[in-house]
Amino acid sequence: MIRINSIKGNNFDAKKCLLRLDLNIPLSDSGEILDDTRIIESIPTINFLQNQNAIIIIISHIGRPKGKFVKDLSFSNIYKKIEKLMNKIIHFIPFEEQNNINKILSKANPGEIYLLDNLRFNRGEEESNKKFIEFLSSFSDIFINDGFGTIHRNHSSITGIAKVLPSYGGILLEKEIKDITECLRYSSNNSVAILGGAKISDKIPIIENLSKSFNEIVITGGMIRPFLFASGKIVSEGISSYTDEVRIAEKILKSNHKIYIPEQLVCSKNLNSEPTLLHCSQIKEQDNIYDIGPNSMMEITEKILISDKIIWNGPPGVFENKNFQLGTKTLIMSINQSKSKIKVAGGGSTIAAINYFNSNKNFTHISTGGGAFLSLLEGKFLEGIEVLKT
Ligand code: 3PG
């Protein structure tokens, strides 16, 4: 059990609390917030600190501006929307005012909330350099990390500052770590991990680690084709399809007997063409796999319904397209119906699918992390967690 220094039971009265959130939220081209989960999930920690009369200085990144000011990636564009979603008053500190922060905070009242502009406008954030860490600590008494989605990064505002200030984990961070690690540790003879995504190379360490604690690993999404080819089930393709991805899939299959690969698939030439239901032995080079067919989904559903531990990352199909969404819809419905003790899901497109089908009620945990969630599934050593341990 990982134990981090919790904010609960501590007193932050009138303390300047530097609160790291993950406000790296998806925005539309016109700047609309497409998914507010990370904002909403940060409210309990903010409420906790406000109730204690702390002065809250929120810090976060958004996007990847690479150490330069990028107007579109300034929190100035969205802090009013964040205010509304949080139902709080936020005092925004623009990037050009950043160096006056001590002066600004000298007038701060207990319970007030400040938001610094995008951390990644400063090169020192991602470089985790001493100067930027000193800057962050120059106006704060306490560091609280509640940005679970960033816990796999070794940046100034995550690991650097935690080595300098008294540091704690926020309510969301604690829950994420507890629910995900408990899922991995829970011992069960009926458990299934459903994994999608396009790049197999990214998934090798995850498949290896999950094989230790799950009975079966179901392959979905973009990984299906190389796995089918590697297992000799797509017969029509020639040597040109023998890619690195296929070689990796071959290696995984040789050393891992717990892999299930769906064989009935919904295919098409492109996303605008008519879908065709094909058995993998019928698939030709020009057929793209865009979803899992009903027979294979039935087999996956059976696995889900007998499991008492389920973890899911990566939608089975292109769920935004009505021709290729049945697999994802069925998967979510099966997880909802299952009586499993543990039902954990995570990752950007997985959350998008759950929200698309308006179906977040029956999971025991939905992670706000993308890379951070996958790093935990991989069993990786994460310094961001290590620095907060008791
Ligand atoms: C995320 O969205 O996964 C986190 O905010 C980390 O963002 P990054 O991949 O740009 O570091």
Image (cartoon, helix red, strand yellow):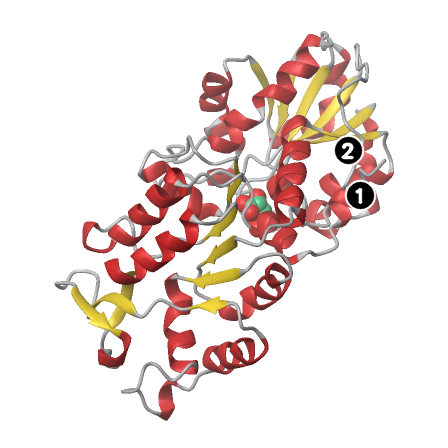
Dot 1: few (<14), some (14–19), or many (≥20) neighbours within 10 Å? many
Residue furthest to the left: 274
Q: Which residue is labeled 1 in the image?
A: 160
Quarter location, residue 113: top right
Q: Tags 2 and 1 in contact by the CB under 8 Å rule?
A: yes
Q: For residue 284, which numbered disc appears in the image?
A: none
Where is residue 7? Give x, y as percent.
Answer: 76, 23
Say which quadrant the C terminus sits in: top right
Task: Give the residue at x 87% y 36%.
Answer: 164
Which callout, 2 or 1, points at the residue further toward the start of the chain? 2
Hey, which quadrant is residue 297 in on the image? bottom left
Is 261 on the left or on the right of 214, as rendered? left
Amino acid type at circle 2 is Leu
Residue in the foreground of this view, choosing between 54 and 97: 54
Labels 2, 1: front one: 1
- Residue at horizontal 45 percent and vertical 17 percent from the top: 84
Whether residue 279 is visible to the viewer of this picture, yes or no, is yes
Circle 1: residue type: Gly
> In which image quadrant can residue 170 be found?
top right
Residue 121 visible? no
Residue plotted at (46% across, 29% down): 77
Q: Which mark is residue 136?
A: 2
Q: Position of residue 59 (x, y in %)?
A: 65, 31
Q: Choose between 104 and 377: the one closer to the eye.
A: 377
**How far apart in space, not on screen, are marks 2 and 1 (Cα)?**
10 Å
